Amino acid sequence: MLLIILLFLWGGYSFLKRNSRDSNLMTAKANRRELKAVISTNGVIDPIEKSDVQAPFDGFVKFMFFQEGDLVTKGERLLQVESEPLELALAGAKAALLQARRQAYQVLEGPPKEEMAGMESSILETEQELRKRRQDLQREENLLKREATTRVDVENLRDQVNVLEVRLESLRQKKQYLVNRFSSEEKEWEVSKVKELSQQVELLTMQIASGTILSPRNGRIYGLSIRSGAYVNKGQLLAQIYKPGQVRVKAYVDEPDLGKIEKGQQIEIEWDGLPDKRWSGKVEQTADQVLPLGNRSVGFVFCSVEGNPVELIPNINLKLQIVTSRKPGALVVPRAAVFSHNGQSTVLLEDGGHTVLRPVVLGMVTPQEVEILQGLEEGNQIVINPDEVPVP
């Protein structure tokens, strides 16, 4: 009787133990499919080609003819920037140029015609009067020889002739001075001054005209950073223009993962703005340096995007996976199912209601899954929580 009771208790204990163990089992099947090793990271959309719109000079934005996201064609007016100091400088330069031209005209062309005409007339009158006085003096000298006149009259006429000769010489010298008043060096200087001021006026005119900023290409406006009435500095970036759909991905890859990146690797892209849509592409350019990004050290990896994704606009934040390696038809099990037993990679194989240790040879490993090269067959059921199951 005692023996029967003991056997009953042992059977009940074994049943409860088996049920308890089986109830804790979490299993999965070894199956064949493509296994991919990926690097998950983030990035932004970057235009393949873009044109920068910069402020041509310091000034105020007077007019804005387009807004962020508008499509523009090459040559269309985008902005109007104006500068009061430039306008005042141009007005001053024009006034100085006008004065310089007047001065140069006098230097190059000689004295005014009216002044020269008056000088010529004075010289002619003096010459005629001097000629008459010389004739009178000659006649009086002949009369004096015949004692038909007095010496006083002769001396008076001689004095008049001397005065007229001095006056005529003075007039001729004054005329010569007027004609040759400026040297060739002075004339060259006046010409150079006019040329310099003309260039200054032309330059200021071009600068002011450059305040009408035209679109450098066909495309869509993005990165518009100013408003009408804003003050801008010369060279300040005001906006950018790109061709919709012609974009790439600038991926931020953490430094430890950069060694796994190669040109031509496949990428898969997600954007929270369109959660039901996916895009793909390839690595085009690996990182050439490491830069700080927040609390990360990253390299910029540039990737193409297949198709013409006009919905992907510059600077939006993306999630992406870079496929660093792939193996089609791999025999795959969850990584959690593999553990080390006596230094050997091992799994717990469920076989006929029992679990048995099965050594395995591993292949490709990802954070969630692992390839089995030897030790299992497709369809084998394995325990994926071996730490919670007593090892047989």
Image: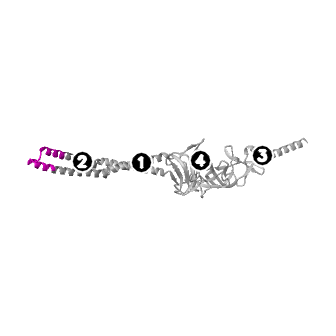
Amino acid identity at mark 4: Tyr
Q: CA distance from mark 4 to mark 3?
A: 42 Å
Q: Secondary structure under badge 4?
A: strand
Most foreground residue, 288 or 36 = 288
- Tell me, for residue 252, which label it has, or none: 4
| Front of the two marks 2 and 4 | 2
At label 1, the amino acid type is Ala
Q: Which residue is mark 1?
A: 95
Q: Residue drawn at (29%, 48%), measured in percent from left and top?
A: 184
- Residue 147: in magenta span: yes
The residue most toward the bottom is 307
Q: Position of residue 278 (x, y in %)?
A: 65, 55
Chain-order first, disc 1 or disc 3: 3
Measured Cα–Cα span from mark 2 to mark 4: 91 Å
Horizontal side of residue 259 vs 27, given as left or right? left
Q: Which quarter shows the C terminus?
A: top right
Residue segment shown in magenta: 136-162
**Secondary structure found at label 3:** helix
Mark-to-mark CA distance, 1 and 3: 98 Å
Q: How is the image coloured?
A: one colour
Q: Magenta stretch: dominant SS?
A: helix
Q: Which residue is mark 3?
A: 24
Q: In the image, residue 29 lies at what x, y percent?
A: 72, 52
What's the residue type where badge 3 is placed?
Answer: Asn
Residue position for label 2:
171
